[in-house]
Image (cartoon, grey):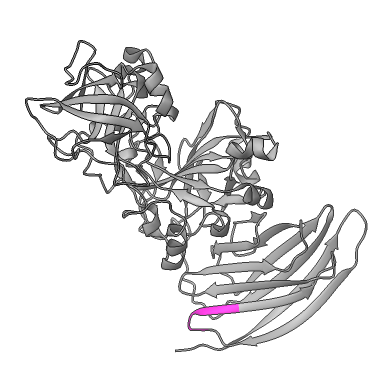
């Protein structure tokens, strides 16, 4: 049944500066015909800053108890500050303000402050909500929607959490400013990712950086920030474009962990300056230091759309993990629990977005086959495909390796963008010739038999190794791989130079044994 309401607005424009300013008051009555349970309020006002009309549109969703507002036609280079009387959430630096109604009130008062320097215009809009039947909570009752008891997270068993069934995401960055999304599963041994990456790469170009340097990454869903780590070195604002832009400005480099519930988690890496509301809770985080929540009260509560931190450089890492799901392509999941307990629970993040945003995000993905989000688990019992670890080492055995922990890793899988191509990714401890390794940063395109079909056999199998680092698949023959599946989840491998005199390769004392 359609509902028809008349919304009455009080609109105040207040110019605020160091000098006294005159208050202007406008009263408007607007009649609209909203669709059922969604009530739209639209206003215009004369701005004192530039004489422009500032358009403000708000949508009240009765079913979800949410209000979504958007401002248009405000002066360029303005700073926008949002607040409302029915939520504790505030927002700065964005033209959108979306929030959950936390405090029942017959009237929602939304305040938009548009500032240039010390001068501000303030617009106050009132929305009639008297027709909404808010349920009253008994005093002292936990305000969480699902009234669940406090638990420990299901990834680390370290952080307090409250379970809920909400698994819907909203965009955390303007999709139009995303140049491309690189899927999960990238083999990038040169940067420590010998095994397939469990995160996607969100890339923006220099124009987006210049246009949107003040935009904050938003929380894709409600939850709590439980840990923030600042890397030991800052990052260039323009990242790989720094030389092209002749701009070497530095910004912080943060890793932020958000628990949406006890079993659902988002991780952002390479975020820049933290939002002031986050810094209020964490204090200054120095290079190489971290902040973590000791309990749920000290965790930083987030509503969907709350600002977290600036983008960082031109690329950020993004991943989502659900502890209710374990990837079947990790034959020995215990390998990962100590070092990266979230890895085996990695999920396709696009599934949590509504169809429109999902379609727009997927249009940015650089991958030619499903699954477009990528794939990271390739282990098949009795076959050479998948992840392997140098015999006698664990996932994080830096001491035994006397090197970076990934030096003892090996992965045989597929290219993350062009999955028709077989790829070898190796750490340096395989004993590979340094000249071969450095030419392709430890990642090689393999030419030879189907890696899903090679199992325990008496003879070794040879593959030709071509350049294949990053997103480029080359045709330079760099070496020859000799490999044999020994059974019992073990593998013998050795890499030979392309100039080897032997037409038929045989293992030598330089071969290595890897296990699952």
Nearest the viewer among 207 and 269 is 207
Is 36 contained in the magenta span? yes
The segment highlighted magenta reads: 35-40
Q: State which quarter of the image contains the N terminus.
A: bottom left
Q: Position of residue 404 (x, y in %)?
A: 40, 20
Nearest the viewer among 438 and 17 is 438
Q: Residue at x 40, y 45 (%)?
A: 161
Quadrant assignment, res 416: top left
Q: Position of residue 394 (x, y in %)?
A: 27, 22
Quadrant assignment, res 285: top right
Q: Residue at x 38, y 51 (%)?
A: 367
Q: Indicate whether 407 appears above or below 387.
A: above
Nearest the viewer among 278 and 274 is 274
Q: Position of residue 81 (x, y in %)?
A: 70, 57
Is 212 contained in the magenta span? no
Nearest the viewer among 499 and 511 is 499
- The answer, for residue 166, to whether it is visible in the render is no
């Amino acid at each position: 049944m359609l509902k028809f309401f008349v919304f009455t607005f009080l609109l105040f424009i207040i110019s605020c500066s160091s000098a006294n300013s005159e208050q202007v008051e406008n009263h408007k009555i607007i009649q609209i015909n909203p669709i059922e349970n969604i009530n739209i309020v639209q206003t215009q006002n004369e701005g004192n800053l530039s004489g422009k009309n500032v358009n403000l549109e708000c949508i009240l969703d009765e079913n979800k108890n949410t209000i979504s507002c958007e401002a248009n036609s405000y002066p360029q280079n303005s700073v926008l500050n949002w607040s409302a009387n029915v939520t504790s959430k505030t927002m700065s630096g964005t033209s959108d303000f979306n929030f959950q109604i936390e405090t029942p009130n017959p009237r929602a008062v939304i305040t938009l402050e548009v500032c240039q320097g010390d001068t501000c215009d303030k617009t106050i809009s009132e929305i009639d909500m008297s027709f909404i039947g808010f349920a009253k909570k008994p005093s002292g009752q936990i305000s969480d929607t699902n009234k669940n008891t406090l638990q420990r997270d299901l990834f680390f068993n370290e952080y307090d959490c409250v379970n809920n069934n909400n698994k819907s995401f909203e965009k955390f960055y303007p999709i139009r400013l995303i140049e491309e999304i690189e899927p999960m599963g990238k083999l990038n041994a040169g940067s420590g990712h010998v095994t397939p990456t469990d995160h996607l790469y969100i890339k923006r170009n220099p124009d987006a950086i210049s246009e949107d340097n003040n935009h904050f990454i938003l929380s894709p869903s409600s939850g709590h920030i439980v840990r923030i780590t600042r890397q030991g070195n800052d990052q260039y604002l323009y990242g790989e474009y720094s030389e092209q832009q002749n701009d070497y400005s530095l910004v912080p480099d943060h890793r932020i962990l958000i628990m949406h519930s006890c079993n659902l988690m988002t991780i952002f890496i390479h975020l820049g300056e933290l939002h002031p509301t986050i810094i209020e809770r964490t204090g200054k985080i120095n290079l190489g230091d971290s902040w973590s929540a000791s309990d749920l009260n000290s965790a930083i509560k987030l509503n969907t759309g709350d600002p977290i931190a600036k983008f960082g450089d031109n690329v950020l890492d993004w991943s989502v993990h659900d502890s209710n799901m374990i990837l079947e392509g990790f034959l020995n999941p215990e390998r990962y629990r100590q070092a990266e307990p979230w890895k085996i629970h990695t999920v396709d993040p696009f599934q949590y977005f509504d169809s429109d945003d999902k379609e727009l995000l997927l249009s940015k993905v650089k991958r030619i086959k499903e699954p477009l989000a990528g794939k990271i688990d390739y282990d098949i019992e009795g076959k050479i495909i998948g992840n392997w670890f140098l015999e006698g080492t664990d996932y994080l055995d830096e001491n035994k390796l006397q090197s970076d922990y990934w030096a003892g890793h090996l992965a045989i899988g597929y290219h993350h963008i062009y999955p028709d191509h077989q790829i070898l990714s190796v750490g340096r401890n395989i004993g590979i010739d340094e000249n071969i390794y450095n030419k392709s940063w430890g990642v090689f395109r393999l030419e030879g038999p189907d890696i899903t079909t090679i199992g325990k056999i008496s003879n070794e199998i040879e593959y030709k190794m071509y350049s294949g680092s990053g997103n480029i698949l080359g045709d330079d023959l760099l070496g020859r791989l000799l490999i044999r599946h020994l059974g019992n989840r073990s593998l013998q491998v050795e890499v030979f130079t392309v100039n080897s005199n032997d037409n038929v390769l045989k293992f030598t004392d330089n071969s290595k044994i890897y296990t699952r």
